[in-house]
Image (cartoon, rainbow, N blue to C red):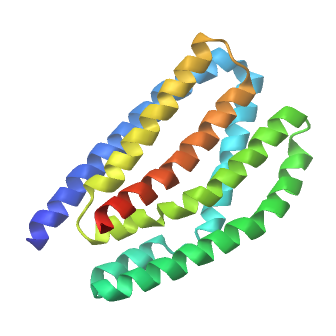
Amino acid sequence: MHLKGTFHNIQWGSIEASTRIFSSVLTGIVVAKYLGPTEFGTYVLVISYFGIFGGIASLGMDQVLLKRWSDSAQYDSVEVLGNALLARMIVSFSLIIPFIVFIYSAIHTLEILLVTVLGLFSQILFSISILKNYFIANMKGSIPAKVSLISISCGMIGKITGILFQLPLEFFILMMALEIGLNGLLFLLFFLKSSI
């Protein structure tokens, strides 16, 4: 059973990774062509801020938790999950102000700055994505893949809609923020559904 579950996780993880890569390249090319070099550069800068923020806020605990949940008893998992989620949210909240100051020094357009700050707040919801490792450790690799596929699809639909309606750069940054927040909310929804 353990080998079958491992193969199942690998299969779903491969589907998720290949879909994420394909959709990132495809939408990246289309959005870059639509926005032009200057606005696309700003878009990529904001995405990199989101990535740096998420990397620091994760505290590097993803692999540690995956190992812990794989080795521990079920009753211990919920306590570890609660502590890890609390730690991530505290760090996310404490990083908001320094990142706003940092972003303000690089982005001087008020609209883009406000949308980027909204994106940083969506990173707090992304803290819930710590559940990804919980599902993988419990041989439920299809759940993180489904969450990723849903959020990627929504992001692609939003970006294509933005291009069709010729919406400004701020819309694309907002779509990225919504995709990040949706990812966290979907993990919470699947967790609550699976624990019932």
Percent across and percent down for residue 41 are 73, 31
Residue 23 drawn at (x, y percent): 43, 32
Residue 34 picture quarter? top right
Quarter of the image with the N terminus in it: bottom left
Which residue is most to the front?
196
Q: Nearer the viewer, residue 95 or 63?
A: 95
Q: Is residue 196 left or right of residue 165?
A: left
Q: Position of residue 119 (x, y in %)?
A: 69, 46
Quarter of the picture containing the C terminus is bottom left
In this picture, residue 91 sits left or right of residue 73: right
Residue shown at 39%/33% (left/top)?
Answer: 22
Quarter holding residue 72: bottom left
Identify which residue is drawn at 69% across, 17% down.
167
Q: Can residue 117 be seen at all in this image of the molecule?
A: yes
Residue placed at 70% from the left, 54% from the top? 121
Residue 34's place in the image compared with 190, above or below, is above
Q: Position of residue 133 (x, y in %)?
A: 38, 67
Q: Determine whether 104 is above or below 140 in the image.
A: above
Horizontally, is 21 left or right of 102 in the view?
A: left
Q: Tell whether 73 sits left or right of 127.
A: left
Q: Residue at x 60, y 71 (%)?
A: 88
Residue 49 appears in the rendering: no
Q: Is residue 65 above or below residue 18?
A: below
